[in-house]
Image (tube, rainbow, N blue to C red):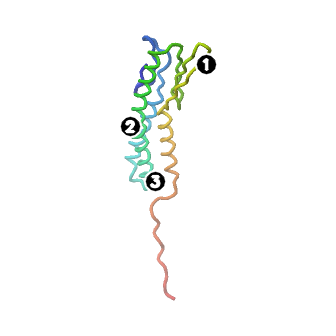
Amino acid sequence: MRFGLGGLRYLYHGQTLTGPHIGYPLVLALLALNTGLLWLARGWGVRAQWMFRVSLTALLLTLGMGWPTLVFTQHMHNDILATEENVSFSASPVILSTQQYGAEGRGKRHQFPNPTAWGVLGLGLTGAAGLRRGGSPRTRAPQNNWA
């Protein structure tokens, strides 16, 4: 089984069980593109600068925490696959999971977070940051103190 920037692939003895699931590399590419465009637009005002900071943070967290999570999950899934029989794997946008089936039909489930969801959340937060009230400070009108 291999997780990487080319997409999540579940392999067993050289055969693809499922995949590639391209959500993680797609989200990283969108976050990188979004961050780059916002970097160019940061001179447009406080909202664009705030959106740039949020997008950059989301990109760094999704890559910085997501990549080690995928490496750990890949290691755990491969250990389970090597030692257990009757195992199924599934990948959703939020959870990467394994299900081990015992002799009586019951099983043990192992669930790991899918960093794709973190990137999608980051994209949503970046958009929400643009809706944030604020902007350039307003200049106060001069007051007449003639009285």
Check the image and report above or below for 142 versus 115: below
Q: Residues within 10 Å of mark 3 (few under 14, many from 20)?
A: many
Q: Quadrant of the N terminus?
A: top left
Q: Amino acid at mark 3?
A: Arg
Check the image and report above or below for 112 versus 13: below
Q: Earlier in the sequence, mark 3 or mark 1?
A: 3
* Tag 2 near tag 3, CB within 8 Å: no
> Residue at coordinates 57% horizontally, 15% vertically from top-left?
102
Secondary structure at numbered mark 3: helix
- How far apart, in angstroms, are the residues tagged by discs 3 and 1? 53 Å
Q: Residues within 10 Å of mark 1 (few under 14, many from 20)?
A: few
Residue under circle 2? Answer: 64
> Residue at coordinates 50% horizontally, 46% vertically from top-left?
127
Q: Earlier in the sequence, mark 2 or mark 3?
A: 3
- How far apart, in angstroms, are the residues tagged by discs 2 and 3? 25 Å
Q: Position of residue 137 (x, y in %)?
A: 45, 64
**Between tags 2 and 3, which lies in front?**
2
Rendered image quadrant of residue 64: top left
Q: Earlier in the sequence, mark 1 or mark 2?
A: 2
Residue under circle 1? Answer: 106
Q: Amino acid at mark 2?
A: Gly
